[in-house]
Image: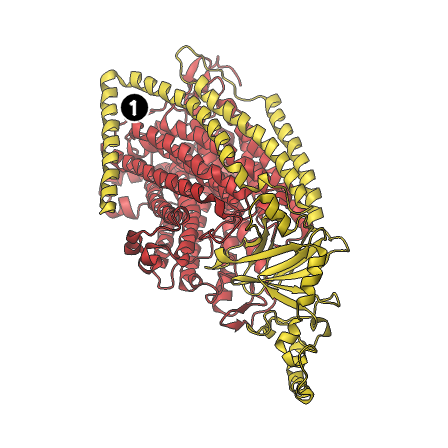
Amino acid sequence: MSNEAVLHAHSDVATHDAHGDHSHEHHHHETFITKYVFSQDHKMIAKQFLITGMVWAVLGGLMSVLFRLQLGYPDSTFPWLESILGKWAKGGHITPEAYYALVTTHGTVLVFFVLTAGLSGTFANFLIPLQIGARDMASPFMNMLSYWFFFGASIVMLSSMFVETGPFSGGWTAYPPLSALGDASPGSKTGMDLWIVSMALFVVSSLLGGLNYIATVLNMRTKGMSMTRLPLTIWALFFTAVLGVLSFPVLLSGFILLIFDRNFGTSFYLSDIFINGVGALPNEGGSAILFQHLFWFLGHPEVYIILLPAMGMVSEILSVNSRKPIFGYMAMIGSLFAIAILAFLVWAHHMFVTGLNPFLGSVFVLLTLLIAVPSAIKVFNWLTTLWRGNIRFTPGMLFAIGFVSMFISGGLTGIWLGNSALDIHLHDTYFVIAHFHIVMGVASMFGMFAGIYHWYPKMYGRFMNNTLAYIHFWVTIAGAYMIFWPMHYQGLAGMPRRYYDFSIWESFKQFQDLNRFISLVAMIVFAVQFLFLFNFFYSIFRGRKVTTLNPWESNTLEWTTPIHPGHGNWVGEIPEVHRWAYDYGKDGKDFIQQTTPVGADESHH
Amino acid sequence: MTILLTTAVIVLVFVVIFQIAKASEYVSLLKGEEASRKQNNKINGFLMVVFLVLGLFGVWYCNEVLFDKTLLAQESASVEGERVDSMLWLTLAVTGIVFIGTQIVLFWFAYKYQENEKRKVYFFSHSNTLEAIWTIIPAIALTVLVVIGLRNWFLFTGEPPKSAMVVEVTGKQFGWIFRYPGKDGAFGKKYYKNIDAATNTLGLLWDDKLGQDDLVTEQTMYVVKGKPVKLIIGSRDVIHDVGLSHFRMKMDAVPGIPTTMWFTPKFTTAEMKEKTGNPNFQYEISCDQMCGNGHYSMKGVIEVVSQEDYDLWIAKQNPYYYAAFPDKDPAAAKPAAAATADTSKTAKPAEVKTVAKM
């Protein structure tokens, strides 16, 4: 067995090098189509994921600005809204149908298209081969398919917005019966069919990508790159891929049952339903709660699919720019592992008030709060990494510090919501919105920005403008807190989520001023993101050029490739690795790259 | 026109910012990149402390402005809700201390350990003692919170006291239907296929004697101060949620699967009007689960009254059965006893059929 493995490994390396040379030879024959469109180069696919994700981030963000207009200025009319939204904003006033469609699409798009595809799709593709020392992914073709399935999903989702009955409008969680019955909500007609098709394509994309990432990390590390020498980014992306591969199929199965209920008369989720104006439906014996189990069995790991890549990149960026090793490398891997396991055992904490068996609920309380332990370890390790370092505030570093701040703020409120006896009061209020936007939305977005600023020189061989980046960071972090921090108070007033208008509610209407303030800040923060977008695209062509191989003086392998690496990444042989990725400030040396052999007089750590 | 103007202003601001940013890049080239990088580092390090101070001030100010608008400033209106509140305060204390502590450490470290040529970095890759400390302390704190939480949870989801009154709550797009068991204290059977939007909103089986004295009302529910009330919750169409923020309780209404919730109201609606100083105060039932385009308007009201007022109210209610069959109402005149017999005869076979289906 072991012999066989060795032989196999050898032949693998051999074919690999051959492949690398091969692609190098034919570099000049690449056409526009094979280089920029149907590319099989992981770096180009990463950029495709990133830019598609950016387009969706702009669309999703714009949607939030539109529905924040309604919440902040419920009594005003905006005639220009009618000119862009037509019947969905009659008289310049967003209709409830449009409001719910915007909320739903904003959620779906941000969670799946931006923070899953845009974040882990981008950085898993870009960093895995570069940081483990591989010429490309295990299957570049599958990798390409993964992007194009995502592209297909995007097109279908986009097209659902132009359907006469409107896009799906039942919330991104798509709970049946609402999502199953077109008669209960117009958005659940054609819009929902397109939504499901789009999500199904997206699941296929995730699986193709995820399997590839796992295979690549396990099989294609360069010589000397043992698992415990991997940078934490790779560990995080690896666990992310495992989570996705194990949970997305469950989501798909849930959707398939939903398709049957919608179109073929089955009763998986439907029972005892009477619809106004239609009458009693024939369906009996189904369970609406079953869908929630299937959905959250993905839905909760999904939160970590979004968060783990950000955690990994932040660990790396904090260490590089503190000029200090990441504190507790093994504990960081251990806590990632613990989070990955627990992610599968906590899904029902989204369902405490569905009538779930109280004993089952109590088990989920225990497991949910258990997640706080590895999370706490990570936070304290990041803080200790900063301690007695020599910090360079690159834009990437600023966003990494912002990530830690956001992760603390949003993580702590998880301790409130994970405790069922408090959730019974706070469930589905603005407190929940504040919690998950801070810990999952903003924090992961910060992780993504950190990653973009940090690896931009590797992606394009140029730097982004620092001044714009600094403005981008400080306005965004201050704005994000100003938007979401006060929402905790709205939640503590019991204010429910997904309300189009609060004016008839004696208990919730006291926040009109605050709502206007939040909407205003949201618009400013949204506008500032265009500074980033402009900086990104402008710098591709006009940014300051990178002149050294290793601009951040970093240890990892990607900085040993040429400034503009071709397909195959390294010219000549792939470098061998002799140490872990975090020898910063060791024995008085600022940094020691992973490719440097261990010296005879080097101290042990 | 205003749009054009706003767009122009925004674009102008962007262009100015961009020019400054570009200029700063050229300046840095003139000054030497290393020198300007160090200067930027100082500015950002300083901003870390500024952000920390302003941020903590903002947290205080936010609390100052918003505290009184939340339920934190109001005592729970149910006996059980007091436990939610005390738990909430404890959780707030624990997480609040951690929040302030870690945020201060984060931004302070960032400021203090900003790049300085004289500093020699401390190569510190791990420490088992430290890591054990910050594994064990959170674990202990969380255990305490879990134990308290679960004790409350089992109380909330357990059986209510025997003295509890029972009300059935049914959600529909977009309103609430309440049913009281009537004098016999028991609900009659129902079956959703018997629902008639006009005369039988819950689909009661009329030949079930237990159901013939059931009372059905919409929008407003009456309960008694100091008397535990158990809600049996269901839905007629999609998932809804009975959200009772003043009582600190919440439970989904799921079609086909009944759920329950109970609580003991502490104050009548009139007393709450006085306590809150709001003459329009209402105990509102908010639907807390997305249920369609009218979700935001799905409002019900709970009227908490004294036992005497409740007795007066209930005495005035007429069983739903009589609303569907006015001729059977003993209170109404009895002009045609023969006609009544006729309807019961013709109605019989239909009822038998539905029962058989169940």
The residue lying furthest to the right in this view is B162
Q: Is residue B196 above or below residue A420?
A: below
x then y, percent, for residue A579? 47, 24
- Choose between A282 and A335: the one closer to the eye: A282
Q: Chain of mark 1?
A: A
Residue at (34% x, 24% y) in the render: A550
Q: Is residue B109 above or below residue A304?
A: above
- Choose between A125 and A443: the one closer to the eye: A443
x then y, percent, for residue B301? 58, 56
Q: Is residue A578 visible?
A: no
Position of residue B181 in the picture relative to residue A567 (left or right): right
Q: Is residue B28 above or below residue B148?
A: above
Colour scheme of the picture: by chain
Chain drawn in yellow: B
Position of residue B30 in the picture relative to residue A22 (left or right): left
Q: Is residue B167 visible?
A: yes
x then y, percent, for residue B6? 25, 42
Tell me where residue B9 sits by quadrant: top left
Position of residue A44 in the picture relative to residue B96 (left or right): left
Chain A in the picture: what colour?
A: red
The residue lying furthest to the top in this view is B118
What kind of element bears circle 1?
loop
Q: To which residue does mark 1 refer?
A: A548
Position of residue A335 in the picture relative to residue B328 (left or right): left
Residue at (42% x, 57% y) in the render: A96
Quadrant holding the C terminus of chain B? bottom right
x then y, percent, for residue A59? 34, 48
Q: Is residue B219 above or below residue A231?
A: below
Q: Residues within 10 Å of mark 1 (few under 14, many from 20)?
A: few
Q: Amino acid at mark 1?
A: Thr
Residue at (69% x, 44% y) in the render: B152
Residue at (64% x, 28% y) in the render: B137
